[in-house]
Amino acid sequence: MWPIIYDFGMIRILGFEFHLAIYSYGFMLVVAFYTCYALLFKEMKRLNYDEKIASDIVTSAALGGIVGSKIYYLIENFDRVLLDPYGMIFSGAGLVFLGGLMGGTIGVTIVLRKNKLPWLQFADIIAPLLIVGYSIGRIGCFLVGDDYGLPTKNIFGMSFKNGAPPTTYESLSYNYPWLDISNWNPGDLITVFPTQIIESIIGLGIFLFLWNKREKITIKGSLFFTYLVISGMERFFIEFIRLNPKYIWIVTDVVGFSGAQVISLFMISIGIYLLIYPPQNYSETKEET
């Protein structure tokens, strides 16, 4: 874990005193922002669009994504919000994929409508950027010690002594009372699945796949629909080893689906349907250049 990259300590400016530090979570968000901007700028230039719009799109996606992520995170962890509202709202945690996707989509849609740009074509352009930004953001979650998985004694298990929350016996039993930690003893530092790194690696692989397909699009929107399917599948399966509570039980107290899995199933279903039956008003064969 490396939650703080550099701590400047207490700073005094014009009579005001505040603590200044570079936090790894925020730093990785900045890295994700500029990576997406650089890639989008490259694509806008390749497709003969005004490159200046790239900054508006990425900024709107970032702001909408962060707000959407936080809202979804707070809703999903509402019981913890009631116990510590200030800490939960202003903590560095909260990069929730589905909330960020919805918030970012709204932000980008506003920019596209304002500039009268084709939504489906830009959805294809942005699809690889969504997953690479997600992949980079997950590294930030890992450095903070947030969004880890279920307890495990697997060789790949890791502990987050100062995580958000820590993976101590007392912390996990308090924050996740439904969790089975009977294989550990009070006072133990519990090892968990490092799902942040797992998702980061998978996300990078998805990005490379989509990025290599971006120049082979024949039907507008198909790359974005592919993104919905693959990303939805990634999140659906990773949820089985994550700590998110289950809301829909398939087999009572044994197999259940989390809220993220339910939404992921919708994403997969919508993506598959639109790949098979693309929107008739927008499906066009790309002209040879």
Image (cartoon, grey):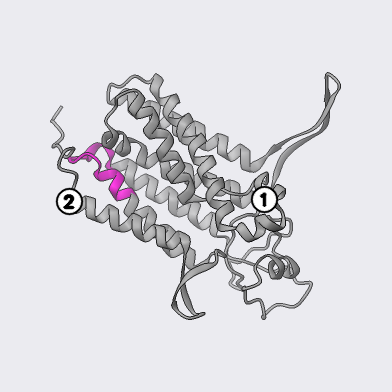
Question: SS of the residue at dot 1?
Answer: helix
What residue is pinned by disc 1? 88
* The quarter of the displayed image where residue 279 is located: top left
Q: Is residue 221 magenta?
A: yes
Q: Residues within 10 Å of mark 1 (few under 14, many from 20)?
A: many
What residue is pinned by disc 2? 277
Residue 43 place in picture, x, y as percent: 34, 29
Residue 113 place in picture, x, y as percent: 33, 28
Q: Which mark is residue 233?
A: none
Question: SS of the residue at dot 2?
Answer: loop
At horizontal 35% and vertical 41% (from top left) the residue drawn is 127
Residue 183 place in picture, x, y as percent: 67, 80
Start-end of magenta stretch: 213-227
Front residue of 78/205: it is 78
Front residue of 39/17: it is 17
Q: Is residue 167 left or right of residue 241?
A: right
